[in-house]
Amino acid sequence: MKYTTKTLAAASAALLSCESAVAFSSTNLSSPRSRSIIGNGINNSGNIQQPQQQQTSTTLYLGDFFNFGKKEEQETTTTPPTPEEEAAQTGYVDDEDPIEKIFGIFFGKKEAEPMGMKRFGAERFPEQYPAVLDEWADPVEGDDKEMALLRPLLKNTNLETRNLRLTYDANRDGYDPVTFHSKVDKQGGAIVFCTTRAGIQCGGYNPKGWVGYGEARGSIAAFLYILGGKYAAAGAPAIKLRKVGGPGLAQMDLPESGPSFSPDALVIPLGKDGRLARSKLGSYYERLPDGTNSLFGKDSNVQLRDLKVYHGVYAEGEYIPFTDAEPFALY
């Protein structure tokens, strides 16, 4: 093959270029710049490649799609307000159970005072709950010696802080059911206090009072009691026996009879039976802690030394609760 002078010159130039490149690489390969060039890489065009940045991925959750463009909030530690504080600030309460919260989604939060009316609760309506057994009411100014004995029993009742008055005294007014009802009917809740000839001081609290219509008046807050004695806990003034089996038949309001706490728990017939009182616990009121089923201990029937009834004092024109029949009462 014949080569022209131009062809041979071009070949010589290319060969010299290759030799120069080899010489450069052998003499400068250990220099920092050379290592940098090699590390970055040289592409086929002879250009230095830039180092590739490490790729990262971000996981997005469903909630993130609703937060685009929102400024990240700084985490702060705050104490949530109590239900009372929240109610005072917003007019709503947040002490709902899960079912109430579900209803709240559709009907809004529960208001503290809907339409200006106070909500039902133990503080405003204590007698919608069973009698407390280990708390005692504070003294009230104006109580005489006997009232002071009974006052502690009235914790969480409508009479807890109300002055008391003696409305019926059997030794003064007679052991007669007609007289009894003429003194106590439509006076509101009352506490009965009796003393047996053996010296046992006992009685019961009737939250619904009497009206003399021959009906059974129910109340879960009714209770019987014995002052002092072996059944009272250390430091306690008395033992209280709660209503059991629901509120029904707490008081048998019979015009021909005196106080009757259920058909059998504490019954004082009056009239021809005179001072007789009988007691059988367990069916409607609690038994005593040792299983005794009478307020009078081993006796089911006793004779009374005295019998008294105390009602609350109400101002003229003040509303007195439970002064009429309750044909549909369920509490």
Image (spheres, helix red, strand yellow):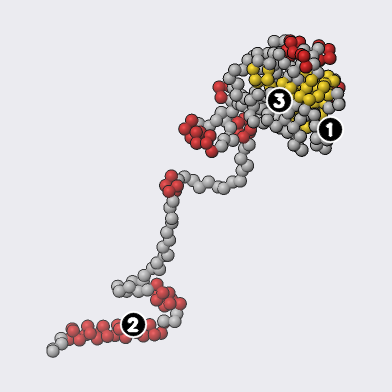
* Type of amino acid under label 1: Gly
Residue that label 1 marks: 229
Residue 205 horizontal/vertical position (percent) = 73, 24
Q: Earlier in the sequence, mark 1 or mark 3?
A: 1
Tag on residue 21? 2
Give the label, 2 or 3, closer to the camera: 3
Residue 119 horizontal/vertical position (percent) = 60, 26
Seen from the viewer's position, the closer of residues 168 and 80 is 168
Seen from the viewer's position, the closer of residues 115 and 246 is 246
Give the label, 2 or 1, closer to the camera: 1
Q: Which SS class for mark 3? A: loop
Mark 2, other Cα within 10 Å: few <14 / some 14–19 / many ≥20: few
* Type of amino acid under label 3: Asp
Residue 136 horizontal/vertical position (percent) = 77, 30
- Compared across the picture, whether 252 is left or right of 310 comes to left
Seen from the viewer's position, the closer of residues 110 and 298 is 298
Q: Which quadrant of the rendered structure holds the N terminus?
A: bottom left
How far apart, in angstroms, are the residues tagged by discs 2 and 3? Answer: 121 Å
